[in-house]
Image (cartoon, grey):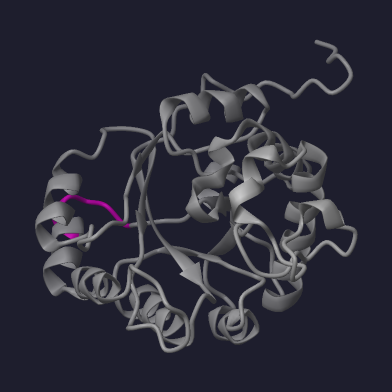
Amino acid sequence: MALLPGEAPPLKEAVTLARALIINADDLGYDPGITRGILQALREGVVSSATLLVNAPNSEQAARQARGLAIGLHLNLDRGAPMDPGFPREWRTVDGGLAGARVAELPADVVEAEALAQLERLERLLGQAATHLDVHKHLHRHPQVLEGLSRVARRAGLPVRSIDAAMRGALRARGVATNDAFVGESGETAYWTPERFSAALAALPGEGVTEWMCHPGHLPQVVTTRYAAQREAELATFLEARSRAALEQAGIRPTDYRVLTRA
């Protein structure tokens, strides 16, 4: 079937993947303490994937330490310097940075160029391809951000995290692979406690790809963030022997987003 200009190829809806769980840690590169905790969760715990901020002070060191692991791009449109040298001045803050408060107004073309620049920087820093794309603070809930990001995802052949059914449908309509279910949040208290881990595991769908978003880490050394001590609580949950035993008992070995590109 011929496609119209700009039309995305349809996804293979007939293919349903067996049950797969991705435990993805956000914010790699945000701060040395946070990075150290994420790497520990990947190497010693049950976390199976992470996403890297490429425009943070700790980005380069974090990338060097994470080479060989399953790492995707944590697209940052909220703060820091843009990676696209042509990022329009009218969409920058007075000090030349990204203006998170104006993200909803960003044109899709601007998002596309910045997402591509950040993805290329990730590949240079890591020396390997990204596993997938997600967005800091879920800013792809804004239609123009989703559109710009989807263009890059299609070009690179990468999956994108969806956080709800509406976003899932919008991504698939654009020919972008995505997860079938999503669990995770961050707030005043730690989200991933042993109790929530057990409950989420018991509720895991019988088929399809589920992502558990998490924020493990040690206390931040440089940045100021409201989600600080909570990261240590999450790290403890993912390092617990009970967590690994529960996954093994359920017959689940956490994976990463490449499960979608191999399908």
Which quadrant of the figure has residue 225? bottom left
- The residue drawn where x is 59% and y is 50% is 101
| Quarter of the rendering occupied by the C terminus | top right
Residue 223, visible in the rendered structure: yes
Q: Main secondary structure of the magenta part?
A: loop
- The residue drawn where x is 58% and y is 41% is 140
Q: Is residue 131 above or below residue 63?
A: above
Which quadrant of the figure has residue 157? top right
Left-right relation of 241 to 99: left
Q: In the image shown, does 45 or 105 lie closer to the viewer?
A: 105
Q: In the image shown, does 208 or 82 lie closer to the viewer?
A: 82
Q: Is residue 192 above or below residue 225?
A: above
| Quarter of the rendering occupied by the N terminus | top right
Residue 231 in the magenta stretch? The answer is: no
From the top left corner, tell me how far across and down residue 146 is, in percent: 64, 36
Q: In the image shown, does 130 or 108 lie closer to the viewer?
A: 108
Left-right relation of 153 to 62: right
From the top left corner, tell me how far across and down residue 42 is, in percent: 39, 73
Magenta range is: 248-253
| Count of numbered circles in the view | 0
Which quadrant of the figure has residue 96? bottom right
From the top left corner, tell me how far across and down residue 97 is, in percent: 72, 66
Residue 263, visible in the rendered structure: no
Q: In the image shown, does 243 or 263 lie closer to the viewer?
A: 243
What residue occupies the far top of the structure in this picture? 1
- The residue drawn where x is 22% and y is 60% is 192
- The residue drawn where x is 77% and y is 52% is 91
From the top left corner, tell me how far across and down residue 233 is, in percent: 20, 72
Left-right relation of 139 to 54: left
What residue occupies the far front of the structure in this picture? 94
